[in-house]
Image (cartoon, helix red, strand yellow):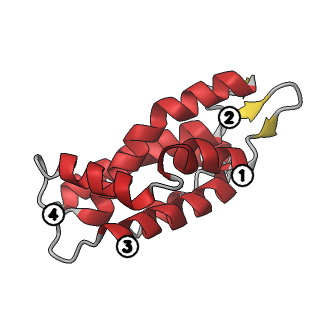
Amino acid sequence: MKATEILGEGVILLEMSLTKRRAEIIFMGLEPQINEHLIKLLAFQATADMKMHWKKELRAWLLRLAGITLKPKNKPVPEKVVYDWLFDGTYGGSEVRNVTMLIAFLKEDYILRDDVNPTVVASSLEDIHKKLAQRISKNDPGLDVIEPL
C-alpha cells in the first residue's frame, strides 16, 4: 500500500519530488532514530504502551520516507539506495559490533530481555531493512513489517 493511500485522499505529503541529495539528507537524518527504535523493539522489555509509542514514531518516519520521489521523473528511491541509507551505511560490515554498542548505550534506560543475542538482533535488523527497502522503493512504508515486533 502506498503512503498516499494510507494517509488518505487530499493529504499533502511533506516531501514529494526531491533531488537525490536532499532525499539522502532526510533518510540519513531519520536513520539513527529508526534503527534505535527497531533495536529497542528487538532487544528490550517494554510495556505495550511503550511498544505502541515506538511503533507510532516508526510509522510516521516510514510514511515520510515512503512519500519521497526523486527528481526529475518522480521515481521512488531505488531499493539498494534505501537499504544503503538506512542500514548498510551504518551497520554493513560491522553489524554485530554496532548493534552491541547501541544495546550497551540503551541499557542505561531500558531493561534488556534475557534471551538477547546481539548476533541475532543484528541479523533481524538486517532482514527488516531488506524488507523495508523493497517496500519503500515502491512508495510503500512497509508498516506490516514493523507491526509484529
- Foreground: disc 3 or disc 4: 3
Res 96 → quadrant: bottom left
Res 147 → quadrant: bottom left
Q: Nearer the viewer, residue 71 or 59?
A: 71
Q: Nearer the viewer, residue 137 or 1?
A: 137
**Relative to 38, residue 42 above or below:** below
Secondary element at tag 2: loop
Q: Which residue is mark 3?
A: 120
Please name the residue shown 74% across and 34% down the image. 69
Asked if labels 4 and 3 touch by Cβ distance under 8 angstroms, the answer is no
Q: Which mark identifies residue 68?
A: 2
Disc 2 versus disc 3: distance between alpha carbons? Answer: 31 Å
- Foreground: disc 1 or disc 2: 1
Crowding near the residue tagged with mark 4, few <14, some 14–19, many ≥20 C-alpha atoms within 10 Å: some
Please name the residue shown 40% across and 70% down the image. 148
Residue 46 visible, this orientation: yes
Crowding near the residue tagged with mark 2, few <14, some 14–19, many ≥20 C-alpha atoms within 10 Å: many
Of the residues under marks 1 and 2, which one precedes in the sequence?
2
